[in-house]
Image: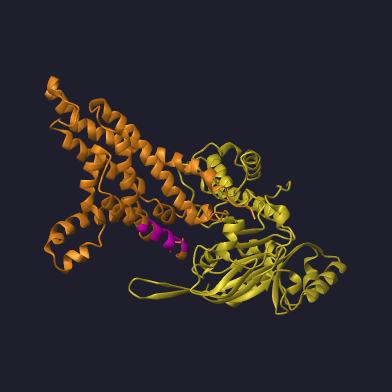
Chain colours: A orange, B yellow
Amino acid sequence: MNRGRLARYSLWQFRDFVMDRGIGIVIIGFLWGYVMFEPIRRAMGGQWIGDQTSPVWGLVLQVASAVASLSVLIAMNGLISIDRKNGYYRFLFSKPVNPVAYYAQLFVVYGVGVLAAMVVLASLARIIFPIFSIVNFLIYSAVIYVAMGGIGFFLSVATRYDWLTLAAVWLGSRVLRGVYGPKGDWRSKVVELLPPVHKLDQVANSLIATGRADAGDVVWLIGYGALFFALGLFILRRGSLADQ
Amino acid sequence: MDRLPAAGDDNRATTAFVIEFKNVGKTYKSLLGNSVKAVEEFSLVVGEGEILGIAGPNGAGKTTLIAMMLGYLRPTTGTVEIGGLPARHYVERSGIGYLSELIAINPKWRAQTALVRYATLAGISDAEIPRRVDYVVDLLGLTEHRDKKVKALSKGNLQRLGLAQALLRDEQILVLDEPTHGLDPVWTQRFRDIVDELRRPQRTMVIASHNLDELQRLADRVAIIDRGRLQRLVSTGYEHAAPAATRFRVTLASGYDLIRAAFPQAEDVGRGEYDVTVHSIQELNAALADLIAKGALVASVVPERSVLEQQFREAVGESQ
């Protein structure tokens, strides 16, 4: 018996993240922030205030939240489905490696990669908003990585078109909760089963701004993602790797 | 070829490495409810040290069988075991040297990097990886291509890279699916030499190929499958040749007029070549001895079809 050195392979996985996704996330995040705030800052000139009393602070929170969501979407894109679709799994898993452990590790490594990219972007954000907390933003990014990434992981196990499905599930949940959530009938109960995207705005604003949020909301978000992550691992174990 | 020291050689000796298919079936179902039986009631044991060939027409179920052997697909019925373990458990515990029919390696990786990555996953230590990578690169003639990206490799070089990753460790089980696909004649021959060198009493090899000549040369037995079923299991040695009428092409360098004395039914096909039909190897040898004794000079005797080819045609049908 001679097991594969999966932990050592995490360095390759991290390298893949940086080259294939991390650099892209940083560029997109930077451009998004730059295009959004630099013209405002220039226009405001000496009136620009980089603190929470700034009229653009609300916009900062929204953009930060959206960048974190987009980063998770990019990180999750094809996490497992690409290996299956392109047949890369054949050589990877003829080695003494457990696919469940391999992809669980990949999820964790990519999570670390997303947080590293968020550190870079948060550091850039602090240049124009000195009160922007890197730690708070990282906590929020970690929450959304588990919440959204867990569902993305499951979808990448279950379908080829994972990023598209994840985006549809995320947006669909937001729309359906908005439409049927307040009705108080059976439909509002059904939409309760959908991903808890309605809690995100509140959690984002609260966590990024103050580092605190309603514990119940955070647990609900993380628990939902963790459940789907575990479900993805289960299907990976019980299903077939070959995509025939 | 130097033997590559095996990772974990010491604790393998006591394990019987046998692949066993027990009444295996695989049915694919579409979303519309249509089902296709890719493999049906397939039972076979591959012994330790054996080289088993798998032959069959396109769509016969060869690749499905191999996918089940590696645990990439779950059988719908029956079980596949290796060394007494469910196939996937065995692979996750010990690994298998596997060359797939389609060489799927991330095209952005460099050949050398790909081998280092696979070596890491194979459990080879950092200290050993350079030596082993150098070994397979040299063995497969990839030295000048090691720094190229996978997407820049030709079909033949990609095939060799696929074989190289399968040979990184001295695995007890090798599964090679269409191993010479895309190789030029020089490397096809080289591959056969490598397989001969890889033959060990404790190593089991499974080679799936369309090339019956190749299986005739390399395999001890060949499983002929068609429509997902094991049609025939053929031993490739001529000592097992069927007693049925067999045609050979005899080429003479001199003594053309003596041919009919030894082979009355010989058909002249020109340039000193004759097609003869015999009913056994003994009859062929007796007639040739008679021909040579009479003074003819025999340049070559080639069977029109190998034992395997004959069996394949009978099992699968002439139309294939």
Residue A211 visible in this rendered orientation of the protein: yes
* Viewer-proximal residue among A57 and A111: A57
A236 inside magenta stretch: yes
Instruction: Relative to B118, say whether B59 is above or below.
Output: below
B246 inside magenta stretch: no
Rendered location of residue A178, percent (x, y): 15, 56
Rendered location of residue A170, percent (x, y): 25, 54
Q: Main secondary structure of the magenta part?
A: helix
Residue B209 visible in this rendered orientation of the protein: no
Which residue is located at x 70 percent, y 80 percent? Answer: B244
Which residue is located at x 54 percent, y 57 percent? Answer: B100
Q: Quadrant of residue B140?
A: top right
Q: Quadrant of residue A14?
A: top left
Horizontally, is B70 left or right of A204 in the view? Answer: right
The residue sitting at the top extreme is A46
Rendered location of residue B85, percent (x, y): 61, 66
